[in-house]
């Protein structure tokens, strides 16, 4: 992660040459249910709890972090974005609503793992993910409460098998040819998600975990994604809705019949 952040910071230095007014938005909205915990469940967000969330990124701001890590992972990062029209991401579960950015350092990134070069061998696979993170900046000797949130959606190119090895992986894309928008148009395959919350109390750089931490995987039951602005309600439907509200208001303002006849 530190290596990724260093690359992201270097990529961010080129933002001054990017005309963000031409940025192309990409979006993803999802609903699902919490499938499993890797840390103790938080009250109100146990297994089976409904979850909803979104990502709103801009392709022109997602910059390549450099040569692929280990020769297979291609990453595009938007580091510490400013002037956003909408949050990078949101997540809602168990009565909680969290928005990214939230803390001092925030970044979104899209990754493509091109593991089948030239063919899929045992243990290799191809996948892509959409990610957002926000965190306090931790420095040596840090004293105070440290927070971080992480949300991601990921899909692996694989076909289920009836028995061992249970999945067959296949060559799905050429990592060197991928662009950030491809993560919003590729097949979803086995789409899943993960949320991670870290809260630590720190004194002079020594930190202990706070009990409210949460980490869970979730299954996705509905998904809407696309390139460009999110669609808005059709004018006809919107007009009917406004007319209905206006009619209801007039009915409330109109006095009862007996009152009108008495005048």
Image (cartoon, rainbow, N blue to C red):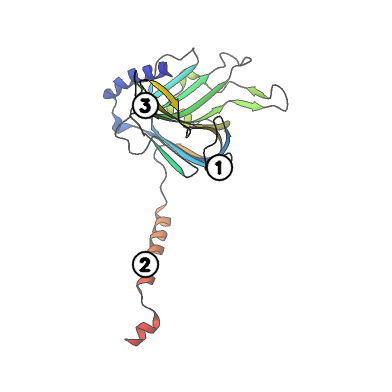
Q: Residue 241's quadrant in the figure?
A: bottom left
Mark 1 and mark 2 lie on one chain; the one further toward the N terminus is 1
Residue 216 position, x and y percent, is: 54, 33
Residue 5 position, x and y percent, is: 38, 19
Mark 1 neighbour density, 10 Å: few (under 14) some (14–19) many (20 or more):
some
Question: 98 above or below 250?
Answer: above
Tell me the quarter of the image containing the N terminus: top left
Spatial separation of the CA atoms under disc 3 and disc 1:
31 Å
Residue 55 position, x and y percent, is: 43, 35
Residue hosting label 3:
78
Q: Residue at position x 45%, y 31% from top?
A: 210
Q: Residue at position x 34%, y 87% from top?
A: 262
Residue hosting label 1:
49
Q: Residue 61's quadrant in the figure?
A: top left
Spatial separation of the CA atoms under disc 1 and disc 2:
37 Å
Which residue sits furthest front? 203
Residue hosting label 2:
249
Q: Is residue 136 visible?
A: no
Mark 3 and mark 2 lie on one chain; the one further toward the N terminus is 3
The count of marks equals 3
Q: Residue 20's quadrant in the figure?
A: top left
Q: Nearer the viewer, residue 83 or 100?
A: 100
148 on left or right of 42: left
Residue 193 position, x and y percent, is: 53, 32
């Amino acid at each position: 992660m530190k290596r990724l952040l260093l690359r992201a910071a270097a990529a961010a230095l080129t933002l001054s040459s990017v005309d963000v007014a031409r940025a192309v938005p990409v979006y993803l909205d999802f609903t699902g249910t919490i499938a499993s915990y890797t840390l103790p469940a938080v009250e109100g967000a146990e297994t089976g709890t409904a979850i909803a969330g979104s990502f709103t990124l801009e392709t022109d701001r997602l910059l390549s972090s450099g040569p692929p890590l280990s020769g297979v992972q291609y990453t595009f990062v938007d580091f510490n974005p400013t002037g956003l029209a909408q949050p990078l991401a949101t997540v809602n579960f168990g009565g909680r609503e969290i928005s990214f950015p939230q803390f001092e350092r925030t970044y979104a990134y899209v990754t493509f793992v091109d593991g089948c070069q030239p063919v899929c061998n045992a243990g290799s696979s191809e996948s892509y993910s959409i990610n957002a993170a926000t965190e306090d900046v931790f420095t040596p000797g840090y004293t105070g409460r440290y927070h971080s949130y992480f949300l991601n959606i990921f899909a692996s190119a694989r076909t289920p098998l009836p028995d061992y090895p249970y999945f067959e992986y296949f060559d799905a894309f050429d990592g060197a040819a991928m662009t950030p928008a491809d993560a919003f148009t590729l097949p979803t395959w086995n789409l899943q998600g993960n949320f991670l919350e870290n809260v630590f109390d720190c004194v002079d750089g020594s930190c202990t975990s706070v009990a409210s931490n949460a980490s869970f995987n979730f299954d996705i039951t509905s998904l809407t994604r696309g390139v460009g602005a999110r669609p808005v309600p059709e004018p006809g439907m919107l007009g009917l809705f406004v007319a209905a509200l206006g009619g209801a208001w007039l009915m409330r303002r109109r006095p009862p019949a007996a009152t009108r006849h008495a005048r």
